[in-house]
Image (tube, rainbow, N blue to C red):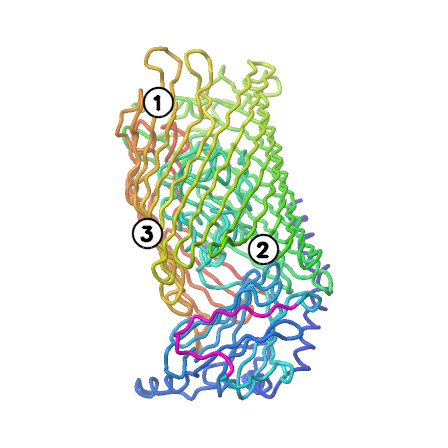
Amino acid sequence: MKIAIFLAGALALVAVQPVWAESLQRTENREQKSLTPLVKKRQKAVEDRNSPEDHIPYLSDFVSPTRTVKEWLAQANSAVIQVTSVKANPTAKGVEILLETSQGEKLQITNRSAGNSYIADIPNAQLRLPSGEAFTFRSEKPITGITEITVTNQDANTIRVTVNGKISLPTVELFDSDQALIFGITTVASSTLPQQQPETSPQQPANQSEGENQPQQPSAANQQPIELLVTGEQNQDYLVPSASTATRTDTPIIDIPQSIQVIPQQVLKDQQITRIDDALRNVTGVIGSTNSFIGSQITIRGFSTTALPILRDGFREYDNFSLQEPSNLERVEVLKGPASVQYGQVDPGGVINLVTKQPLSEPFAEVQTQFGSYGLVRPSFDISGPLTSDRKLLYRLNAVYQREDGFRDFNTETERFFIAPTLTWNISDRTKLNFSLEYLDSTRPFDTGLIAIGNRIGNLPYNRIFNEPDDFVQTNSLNIGYNLEHRFSDNWTLRNAFRYVHQDLFTQATLPAFLDETTGNLTRIYAQREYKSDDYSLQTNIVGKFATGSIKHTLLAGVDFNNNNFGDLTFYDFNTPTSLNVFNPIYGVVSRPNFATFSPTSQYDTYTTRWGIYLQDQIAFGDQFILLGGLRYDSVDYQYRSPIGSDFDKYDDAYSPVVGLIYKPAKGVSLYASYSQSFVPNFSQDANGGYLKPETGEGYEVGIKAELLQGNLLATLAYFDITKQNVATPDPLILGASVATGEQRSRGLELNVTGKILPGWNIIGGYAYTDAEITQDNSIPVGNRLPGTPKHSASLWTTYEIQSGDLQGLGFGIGFNYIGKRFGDLQNSFEVDSYFLTNTAIFYRRNNWRLGLNFNNLFDINYISSAATSSRIRGIEPGQPFTVIGSISVEF
């Protein structure tokens, strides 16, 4: 059935092929009619190589070979073309950017798109004044629909032109002449919009003269366009300069006074990520597993929680017992520290936001098959483009089917089917409506993990299981919603979004109950459980940009609502427990009961209503100071109803502030400090039967962010101090009661870097020192370390792709993960050894084909990926042994 649905999705590719092909043909016809002799010369060089589909010119087509270092240096110096001025001129259709040079016809252009941004790189060129000094050009809001145009030196031999569209990818035509290289820029509907005089702010030395003494520049109206096609090709760099998780506004990371780390889609591709857990290894201070259903937990800056702090496109998923599928993700954003001011009830470690792919305005399609160790087979496709000729209706469709046996000794194999259609309707140049749907059906083993014996993990094979081989968990989820955005003006935007998430879970399990560590006999209980969840969320906010004198504001005000209905039906067979010797296991000794004849052991429904209202202002005092201030009020109304137990109601509310300051002493450098709070409802009861006040968290953070290597590399160094208070701990006077006097504290240092070192050489990595411990408690010794948190952890992943020559497109990757020793529970009763993982990759990209081969856990070490549990016999998750994943993909 799942394969049939997957094939039906593939047929959608055929269904949209006429529209996609027609759009592409129109683009090709337009280009063929407007080819200049320069383009024809380039095409002939391609045809001479008997490769009509290869549009990438070889270096030898333009530059004669060199045989000595001296010749190479002389040739390189002579090949760099000087661009001595950049102009922005209004036109009838929009604006044109002129790069003044006497050798405009010799410039070679490579272009791509990333979201709503058009990016063009011009190799062998530099921005230089006649005096020889470098400069940068920037134009803000030159026309309606374009937020910014920048022209800058990307490196010593490359100019980068970036055009950022506000709601869609801009249309760009390229013209050349003897005097300049010209970019003609319009938006989708710019011909109907009033034109604005460009607001230029070229950042250059004061002696540069821009005015009446400059020669008259050529107009694009008198030129012929050069071949240009912007496609859905993804940016292959690792650096994502902006993020929305921290502020709900698209803010440059360097202007956010909190630590936030982004894993871009290119990292997910290069590492062949099939599980979110593996992607999070790239984030400093994040350790553990998102598979919380079996007792595993994820920790962020030392704080662990089974209520996973996972968002999907900014919406919290409160009952997260379905796996998170990464195939339709654009990126992963991780905000560190207390974040209740934006997202309500969360633990103080931070939140993880999964940002999904959106429809593209140009036809794009990618088909991929992954295969690997333990029977892994994973075909997928990603198609996108316009459904109408005016590009007002755009679509995207992602689908994946996965099957694998796994390395653990289960009879149940993992099978997963996922499909995600998305539709965007550009109602007007100011209004956009997006509809999205995600459906996931998953079956996998119910794996309780390894066990602790003494003060260590049991010395047992890591593939051995301690429940029954036919245990399984089956889940399916449906996520459907819309995002509406309306711009009243260039400065004021209203957003309204809705999500409905339905989840079902059914599991057949054998639960460990007690281990005799001397004999190795593990007492287990047969169980069957059904969960269901219906989650409704609504968000509305308004973003306004305005100025009070010389002070600039970005104001955010919003309200969000969530209604959650959760049901649980559980059966336990306490009458016929089954025993398993962990040193010599024999399975199936006791038959599994027929739970249809049992009365439920646990049956209840919960109804939770959450309201939140927030206000935030990002205030810029000139170019050097940015102040962030925000306040949120939350209320949580919780109702518990059970036909076989006691009903109860609970109500909590809380205020959560955030304040941060950024000082920018130089371009590309930010010093920042911030303070924020968080809260989580507390369900423990005091001696009078009343519920304790919510757990609260407060965090202080100071750090420095720097854009290095001409803005290609972003580095962040942060020190944090977070305290979690009102933690429930046993009442020393009343047996069975609790008091909210517990306290946990985490302090540490984090360093992370992301971006590009040289063309083709990408890197993402970091180091974290985390000192997380119990500071107050009535039962747990003060000074005990928080579970699952090592003092030292580090990660590094880097790839290099050969940029020219016969081996162009061949790339290599290598990565390391180090996790220090850590304790597995709050009592610190057992310790988990440190580990050092090595992962490698080799890939080859040619035209629209890509082949990849990844080798994970290269030296086949035994390690524990997650150990932050409340039990010594459940939730200790072993990491995968040496595995190989291969892939072949094609874009068209």
Q: Earlier in the sequence, mark 2 or mark 3?
A: 2
Q: Amino acid at mark 3?
A: Leu
Q: Position of residue 854 (x, y in %)?
A: 43, 57
Q: Quadrant of residue 131?
A: bottom left
Q: Is residue 280 left or right of residue 371?
A: left
- Residue shown at the point (50%, 63%) measured from the top left: 235
Q: Residues within 10 Å of mark 1 (few under 14, many from 20)?
A: some
Report if residue 837 is visible in the image.
no
Q: Position of residue 845 (x, y in %)?
A: 49, 68
Q: Amino acid at mark 2?
A: Asn
Tag 3 secondary structure: strand
Residue situated in front as seen by the camera: 86 or 637: 86
**Magenta segment boundaries in residue numbering:** 195-212
688 lies above or below 503: above
Q: Residues within 10 Å of mark 3 (few under 14, many from 20)?
A: some
Q: Which mark is residue 741?
A: 1
105 in magenta = no
Q: CA distance from mark 2 to mark 1?
A: 47 Å
Q: CA distance from mark 3 to mark 1?
A: 33 Å
Tag 2 secondary structure: loop
198 in magenta = yes
Residue indicated by mark 3 = 717
Q: Which mark is residue 491?
A: 2
845 lies above or below 879: below
Tag 1 secondary structure: strand
Contact check, label 2 and label 1, Cβ < 8 Å: no
Image quadrant in which the N terminus is located:
top right
Contact check, label 3 and label 1, Cβ < 8 Å: no
Q: Main secondary structure of the magenta part?
A: loop
Q: From the image, state whether disc 2 or disc 3 is nearer to you.
A: 2
